[in-house]
Image (cartoon, rainbow, N blue to C red):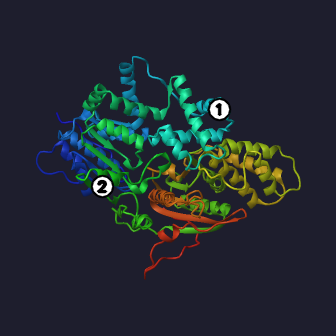
Amino acid sequence: MARPVSEAVPSDAAPAAELPAGEVTDADRILAGLDEQQRLAATTLGGPVAILAGAGTGKTRAITHRIAYAVATGEQAEHASLALTFTARAAGEMRTRLARLGAGGVQARTFHAAALAQLSHFWPRITGSRMPALLPQKASTLADAAAQLRLRLPTAQLRDAAGEVEWRKSQAMTIEDYAVQARIRPLPTGIAPEAMIDLHMAYERVKDERRQIDFEDVLLATAGMIEREPVVADEVRSRYRHFTVDEYQDVSPMQQRVLAAWLGDRRDICVVGDPSQTIYSFAGADAASLSRFVHDHPDAEVVRLERSYRSTAAVVGCANRLMRGRDALTLSAASGEAGREPSLGVHANDSAEAAAIAAACRAQVDAGADAGEIAVLIRFHAQSGLIEQALASVGLSSTVRGSQRFFEIPVVKRAVMMLRSAPADDRPVFQAVTDIVMGLGYRAQPPETHGEERAQWDALHALVTLAEEVGGTDLPAFARDLQRRAQTEHEPSVSAVTIATIHAAKGLEWRHVHVCGLAEGLLPISHATTLAEIDEERRLLYVAITRAQRTLSFSWAKGSGHQLRQPSRFLAEIAPPRAGGGRRGASTAGAAGGR
């Protein structure tokens, strides 16, 4: 009896094709709804295969249909196939789609989930003891390690040190390797290279004494076990023979090592991704991963998905202009709908920019859009506060994705409490606020690092900037206003505008997208100084642009408090060409856009 093959058609799906006359097989049904490029991806079986899939081109649809087609035609054994991705949500989506396509026996997991299952299975057999306990988080263990070294590190520095541990392990570095890098790479402010190296060693020692492993150790131990134990290698490789790796551009060196251990000398692997969406270099991702895969496998079949079912031609054209000349995929709008060109708003300061974005969102809702169809994308968390309040002031609820709401950030909570309890005096509000938050570690210049310490500085700087723009000498009134803003932002929301960092927005889409802060120092961010770092910022903007389905707006503020800004270097590149050639100048109009 034929297995049922059905799948709800997502918004980025190609129009359904007619089934061929005569007997209809499961394989026919699986291919029926795919466009020509997706069909080629689904029917290019065996390996090695690289699928270069642009934003909105139906990547997940293509690869789940490819796996299901391979199972339906007998090219892959269902229970010997492993699909790997990076989030539990994405893995769950793949499992759901595969089940609907009749391939529910295929495993779809994150790298860590697959490795942890194998490690839990083999550790007692190989070592004769129970597996060490998995650390839920690193900060407390690092604090104990720091105490042994008589290092006094605040919470922000401990979190940044945890980030350094994660970076070292994602790069598959020994501590000796890291010792070389620690002397040449930026470290959390206040921690000298030698102290950081000692902290890493003490952290590993504390873990060993307590029989604990961390999240990254799971990959390291799994790879080591397969590499050193032939019995384990044989069993793992006989269990999984066909591999699909989604978001391959985000694979770290450590994950690549685990993948190589799983594969052995076999070649049945399909990697999928888009170099233009590599935005996790800080976690070990490398934009060159896909091109390196093709170089290392000169006989690899390469399939390109470039028909966007998400965005209008105007949005797609903007994305293409940003990446022109960088060996990127060239997207085309499958619908053929031109759409309106992205707009640009230029404003006096951050508050004015937030107000203009809120007014644009209000206009879109009044024109019939649901608030949930609208997103405001920001570069870093501390930008959310003004946006949240501006939306509330026009009667729109908001939800912050990928971070805490601004007034829930611990350092902001402490600052507001200190401001509320401060006595009134004749100092300007700006000066009073600055003096108070300096007690929380704020300084005039941002720290050179870009982890938790920088995030706390950005949050406090947002308060200082707001105080500059408010002006006056009434500190108690300013503190009451902050409390009112915090209370407003805690109102329950049913249909809400999404505020998200660009990192948190990856993989999502909205009908209307507003990208704010297109100024030097924000996007690209100030600590991006090398060519590689600027390229990462470019890819971040590309991801932001390609979240938009129908309308897209950009904005920036000329000033932040007393600090003047310059427009982002990327704006000149994304401006649409004039009808008679050249580039159109930036408009100062508001960023409204109807449904």
Farthest-out residue, bottom: 580
Residues at discs 2 and 1 in contact (Cβ within 8 Å) = no
| Towards the viewer: 392 or 569 | 569
**Mark 2 = which residue?**
14
**How many numbered circles are shown?**
2
Q: Is residue 432 above or below residue 190?
A: below
Relative side of 421 to 87, left or right: right
Q: Find residue 374 and report its horizontal and vertical position in percent.
A: 52, 55
User: Element type at marker 2?
Assistant: loop
Q: Horizontal placement of 250 versus 364: left or right?
A: left
Q: Quadrant of residue 365?
A: bottom right
In-image side of 520 versus 71 (left or right): right
Q: Residues within 10 Å of mark 2 (few under 14, many from 20)?
A: many
Q: Spot the residue most to the left.
A: 22
Nearer the observer, 358 or 470: 470
Q: Position of residue 160 (x, y in %)?
A: 59, 42
- Give the amino acid at mark 1: Leu
For the question of whether residue 35 can be seen, the reply is no
Amino acid type of the residue that numbered disc 2 sits on in the rendered structure: Ala
Give coordinates of residue 395: x percent, y percent: 63, 54
Going from N to C along the chain, the mark reached first, 2 or 1, is 2
Direction top: furthest residue: 128
Disc 2 versus disc 1: distance between alpha carbons? 60 Å
Secondary structure category for the residue under label 1: loop
- The picture places residue 86, in percent across and down from the top left corner, at 42, 42
Residue 149, numbered label = 1
Say which residue appears at 27% left-offset and 40% top-offset: 101
- 499 and 238: which is toward the camera: 238
Relative to the observer, which residue lies in front, 218 or 11? 218
Residue 559 got which mark? Answer: none
